[in-house]
Image (cartoon, rainbow, N blue to C red):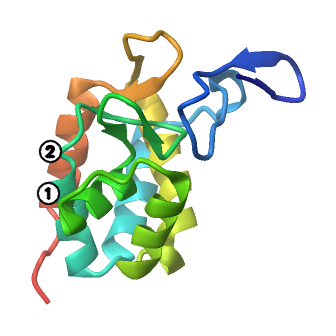
């Protein structure tokens, strides 16, 4: 599958779905500013939502950047939270969106996604298919640390 970015054609695996944003169009950011923005967005989420995201980060083989889900047990933090809550991996766009809505992420979903993708671009690598942007192991550790530092009780 090829997605037209407005500037050039960018190839993506057709099984990857979500809010794809080619690397060259992704806003560059200052890592400290991006982390502060992500922390602010996550802090506004309920403690329940933060716990699901935190625990969900341990489920996928890779944390996706710029999309919701891909084959090979790869997904974004919100899709991994849905996986944590339901016990099964959401592998379709509808399943991910339904899970996000049912868990109450819907009001924060777009803001979280934008803040995460901006922050994650500072810690990205490419998965084995060379097309899919994923969070590096250092990035995953940093994200877990960032969420662990926030309150998780009701």
Dot 1: within a 10 Å radius of its alpha carbon, few (fewer than 14), some, or many (20 or more) residues?
Answer: some
Residue on which the image places disc 1: 55
> Circle 2: is it few (<14), some (14-19), or many (20+) Cα within 10 Å?
some
Q: Give the camera-side residue of 99 and 122.
A: 99
Q: Residue furthest right?
A: 6
Find residue 58 and name its label.
2
Picture mark count: 2
SS for callout 2: loop
Residue 128 image point, x, y percent: 37, 10
Point 44% across, 11% down: residue? 129
The image shows residue 28 at horizontal and vertical percentages of 60, 32
Are the two marked residues, 2 and 1, in contact with CB atoms closer than 8 angstroms?
Answer: yes
In the rendered image, which quarter contains the C terminus? Answer: bottom left
Q: Residue 27: percent from the left, percent from the top?
A: 65, 36
| Residue 14: quadrant of the picture | top right
Residue at 35% x, 66% y is 42
Q: Say which quadrant the N terminus sits in.
A: top right
């Amino acid at each position: 599958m090829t997605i037209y970015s407005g500037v050039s054609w960018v190839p993506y695996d057709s099984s990857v779905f979500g809010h794809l944003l080619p690397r060259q169009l992704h806003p560059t950011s200052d890592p400290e500013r991006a982390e502060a923005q992500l922390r602010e967005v996550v802090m506004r989420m309920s403690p329940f939502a933060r716990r699901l995201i935190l625990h969900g980060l341990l489920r996928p083989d890779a944390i996706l950047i710029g999309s919701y889900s891909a084959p090979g047990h790869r997904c974004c933090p919100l899709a991994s939270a849905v996986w944590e809550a339901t016990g099964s991996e959401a592998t379709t766009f509808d399943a991910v969106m339904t899970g996000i809505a049912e868990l109450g992420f819907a009001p924060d979903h777009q803001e979280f996604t934008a803040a995460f993708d901006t922050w994650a671009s500072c810690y990205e690598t490419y998965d084995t298919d060379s097309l899919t942007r994923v969070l590096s192991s250092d990035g995953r550790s940093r994200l877990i640390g960032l969420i662990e530092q926030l309150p998780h009780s009701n």
